[in-house]
Amino acid sequence: MKLVEFCQSNIEKTSKGTFNHLMDNSDVDVMDYECTNDCGVCSRTAFCIVEGKRIAAKTDEQLLARVLEELQKDDEPDIFDYIKDSL
């Protein structure tokens, strides 16, 4: 299961829609923390951390689109996995 992490302060300010959307998705493990120590980013933009990678956007809607795109990338089969499985 993929992990998406949020700062509680950022949820309250800018990323609540993305957080709520992902909470409704049983394929994603969503965690919220009091602070993620990303205060510079958190104070300026909507952001979260997807599988260890910081994703940021100007709006909550843009953040959701970027997060969903990032989550989909992880679902795409890797060519090396295909080759390994065919051996």
Image: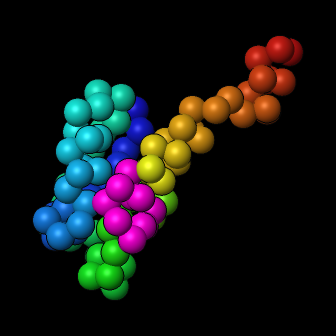
Asked which colour scheme the image uses, the reply is rainbow
Residue 31 or residue 46, whichever sits in front: 46
Left or right: 79 as drawn, with respect to 48: right
Residue 51 seen in the current view: no
Q: Residue furthest bottom?
A: 40
Q: Where is residue 85 in the image (x, y as percent from the top left)?
A: 76, 17
Residue 22 or residue 36, whichever sits in front: 22
Name the residue: 36% across, 29% down: 27
Residue 78, magenta (yes or no):
no
Left or right: 68 as drawn, with respect to 9: right
Asked if residue 12 is positioned above or below residue 72 in the image, the reply reads: below
| Segment tinted magenta in the rendering | 55-64
Q: Position of residue 55 (x, y in %)?
A: 45, 62
Q: Position of residue 64 (x, y in %)?
A: 38, 51
Residue 62, magenta (yes or no):
yes
Residue 16 seen in the current view: yes
Q: Where is residue 18 in the image (x, y as percent from the top left)?
A: 29, 50
Name the residue: 39% across, 71% down: 58
Quadrant containing the N terminus in the rendered view? top left
Asked if residue 1 is positioned above or below residue 20 in the image, the reply reads: above
